[in-house]
Amino acid sequence: MAQHPVSPQPVSPQPPDWERLAVSESFRNLMRDKRRFIVPTTIFFIVYYFALPVLVGYFPELMKRRLWGPVNIAYAFALSQFIMAWVIAWIYMRVAERFDKLASQIVADGARR
């Protein structure tokens, strides 16, 4: 029976100094950039989500207006919420790639010091 050579485990570098990274300028910039994206996006989502019941409650005649066949504005708006959620998720995935790269760079820079 042939023996498979065991590959040596890579020596891990010193772990980063998390406290120093947390107060670094690059980390604060990353957190600021994330807030600038996440807070307005969340506010938009909440406003868009609650717009349907508010519009149906305060403007029922407008929301009853038919667009095509049995589909009225309220149904179209409700369906648009699914599309909007998927679009926000897609945009977030794109933006999060940049955040992840920046975070990895910050950690790598911190491990080197």
Image: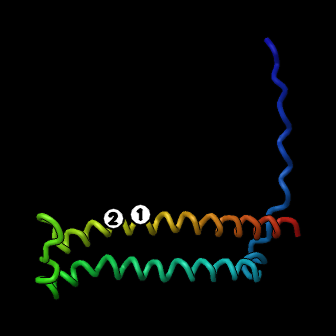
Residue 15: name its quadrant.
bottom right
Q: Amino acid at mark 2?
A: Phe
Q: Secondary structure at mark 2?
A: helix
Q: Amino acid at mark 1?
A: Trp
View extreme (top): residue: 1
Q: Residue at x 82, y 69 (%)?
A: 109
Which residue is disc 1 drawn over? 86
View extreme (bottom): residue: 58
Q: Are marks 2 and 1 in contact (CB under 8 Å)?
A: yes
Sort mark 2 into few (<14), some (14-19) or many (20+) by Cα contacts within 10 Å: few
Q: Residue at x 66, y 65 (%)?
A: 100
Name the colour scheme: rainbow
Q: Residue 8 versus residue 56: which sits nearer the camera?
A: 56
In the image: residue 54, left or right of residue 48: left
Q: Secondary structure at mark 1?
A: helix
View extreme (right): residue: 113
Q: Residue at x 41, y 63 (%)?
A: 86
Q: Is residue 5 above or below residue 45?
A: above
Q: Residue 72 versus residue 23: which sits nearer the camera?
A: 72
In the image: residue 31, left or right of residue 79: right
Sort mark 1 into few (<14), some (14-19) or many (20+) by Cα contacts within 10 Å: few
Q: Residue 68 versus residue 107: which sits nearer the camera?
A: 68
Alpha carbons under labels 2 and 1: distance apart: 6 Å
Q: Residue at x 79, y 11 (%)?
A: 1
The percent coordinates of residue 95 (x first, y second) are: 58, 69
Residue 16: name its quadrant.
bottom right
Disc number at residue 22?
Answer: none
The percent coordinates of residue 17 (x first, y second) are: 79, 71
The percent coordinates of residue 113 (x first, y second) are: 88, 70
Which residue is disc 2 drawn over? 82
